[in-house]
Amino acid sequence: MTGVGFRPEVQALRALAVMMVVVNHLWPAQLPGGFAGVDVFFVISGFLITGHLTRELVATGRMDLPSFWSRRVRRLLPAALAVLAACLVLTLGMLPSSMWRENLGQIVASTFYVENWVLVASSTDYFAAEDAATTVQHYWSLSVEEQFYLVWPLMLVVAVWLATRSSGPRGSQRRRAIVTSIAIVGLVSLAASIVFAGIPGGGGYFSTVTRVWEFMAGAALVFLPTLTRWPAWVAVMAGWLGVAVIVACAFGLRGATDYPGVVALLPVVGTVLVIAGGSPLSRWSISSIARRRSVRYLGDISYSLYLWHWPLIVAAPFALVAAGGFASWWQRALVLALSVVLAGLTKRYVEERFRRAPAGVPRTTANRRALILPLAAGVVMLAAAGTVMTVVVTPRAHAVEQAFDALREDGCLGADAVVNGCDDPFGTGPSLDPMLAAADRVPVCGSSLGRPAAGETAATCVYGDAATRPVIAVVGDSHAQIIAYYTARWALEHGYAVREFTSPACPVIARQELAFPHANRATTAESVDSWEACRQTAEGVLSEVAEDQGIVGVVVTNATRTYIDQEAPDRSILAFDVAERALRELSRDDRPVLVVRDVPGLDFDQGTAPQCLAQHPDDVSACAAPRADVTLADDPMVEAADRVGAATLDLSDFFCDAALCYPAVGGVIAYWDRAHLTRTMADTLEPAIDDALEEAFG
């Protein structure tokens, strides 16, 4: 078996991997594939951990699991907990209150090393995917590693026990069982990785299942002969070739590439080549660079540097508001320098302090103490999060309800403030609370589906008995999902059923010949794949709705401005001719159609509406946008509706005066992100929506 003592080339790989990740997060345009540094770490862990585990297991058939796990706890948990505590302080001290709930929840998840599964759930939920990154999002990879450390030793013990039940040389049986386990687990995981990488919003990037094969690639190296048995120049060339492949990935891969999947083989193979090359005694080898003090130091602090850099990046824009945000190179360089300093201090005073068991303490006692630490840490983090919820969130929620009741009694809550001519309807009201607004969302159909995969239809929900009642269809993207909720409430009271045909980030009525709709977003492999799925969805929905004789009316709305290229509106996917053609098809046989003009939404340099208002609690106008910038003077949906004789509903005046559109109306925050209505605001718009539905279908 290949030795796993101190390996200079492994230390160099750590240094390279952590700098890839950090630079990618600070300067993503310059190093778009730096995220592949995580793959390098996974291969290294698989190699080192399997080497440590199998030496004793092959020789004796036994493994001291408590000692192994306690060493892992002492090595990794103190620094991780220290940074989690810092993230808690950063969250409460620097981030907008609108981000507290999500951060507190993920801090707890990271304490128990299940952050990756939280992100898997979020990545399959279109609306959760819109949330801002938390200070602990990078703990997903640490969660994957800890899950590997927990399960892999148990699998090896079981595999060896099963293998040695038969007769034969025990050593070779154990070795064969371990190698077989590596092969089976690796191949199954790689297959899962390839499958899930091709599913938009499938969560494969964060899943342990789709990442284990990378650990197995490192594990396989333990049982493969090293290249050091070959001429030195072969090992040297292998090492440099591996580095070249990894560096090429750092510059060549894109975040939107289907990942991990087959593409992840590149950094994995590169890492395998470097480790297989070993440390030949040649001045031309990787190890000659790896032995330099600066490289060794960077490798030494790589774990702490990974821990510290991300929370500083998340907090920096809010700390540097007065300096114009987190945009200049010197600000990012300052974050990098601060990350290195904190990593060095953490390495010296935290990692080294707790790495070894206390002298004079029996091993079983030391193991027991180490294994109790994660449970104690989890209890502390749960208590901290619970305290914040009890002391801060609950009282604020109660205060908001009282303020809402007062505004409601005066007829000045939300849209009612505009209808009833209340004083300063777009001013700051006592009920504004960004923390609560971020979670104030309308129940929607299919929000967990994301954009449909190729060949699938849009999310279809049915409200009421569509077999016996006339049906109203609601067609559109995620904005239509919100309108569908209120359409269903009206329809069920008026003898209708509702069928919803919606797909987030897909307008459903679409120009089929265009490759990608979002003129204001970068065209990537992922975006083109998603748009292809959207085009297939649109074709199916338009045909189904138009031909279904049970559908007696249609409501259509979309985030229209998202799909309009202001420089070439005629080529946009929701250009006038496209919208007109779709509406004529939907209104076949004189079927009534209601087109709801999209709400204005807002464009923020500093995140979502709740985030902006949390930073400007006394000045709503600081988060307002010029009306001309967030509404379309020539809205193709409205123009097409006028041409075909469809009814229209324009809600813009509930959000805007003559000059500006605001993120708050009548003491209510209008959007929980940049453009999706909060439940409270949408509820106050329900009378206007009901009137339009009554006029169109009543």
Image (cartoon, rainbow, N blue to C red):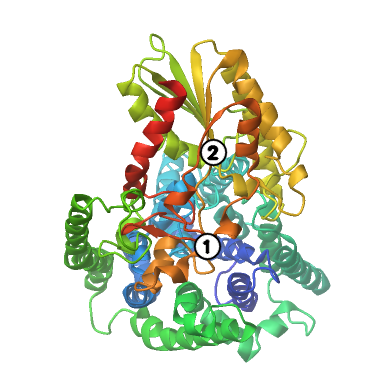
| Residue 451 in the image: above or below residue 142 | above
Please tell me in which quadrant of the rendered image residue 383 appears: bottom left
Coordinates of residue 538 in the picture (x, y in percent): 63, 29
| Residue 399 in the image: above or below residue 86 | above
Q: Nearer the viewer, residue 256 or 229?
A: 256
Coordinates of residue 202 in the picture (x, y in percent): 53, 42
Q: Nearer the viewer, residue 596 or 98?
A: 596
Within 10 Å of disc 2 (Cα), the crowding (few <14, some 14-19, many 20+) is many
Amino acid residing under circle 2: Asp
| Residue 327 in the image: above or below residue 161 | below
Whether pointer 1 and pointer 2 mark residues with C-beta atoms closer than 8 Å, the reply is: no
Residue under circle 1? 659
Which residue is outermost to the front?
A: 421
Position of 689 with respect to 600 (left or right) is left
Position of 70 with respect to 659 (left or right) is left
Q: Nearer the viewer, residue 85 or 443?
A: 443
Within 10 Å of disc 1 (Cα), the crowding (few <14, some 14-19, many 20+) is few
Residue under circle 2? 477
Q: Determine the CA span between mark 1 and mark 2.
A: 28 Å
Mark 1 against mark 2, which lies toward the viewer? 1
Asked if one can make out residue 509 in the rendered structure from this viewpoint, the answer is no
Position of 418 with respect to 29 (left or right) is left
Q: Nearer the viewer, residue 695 or 82?
A: 695
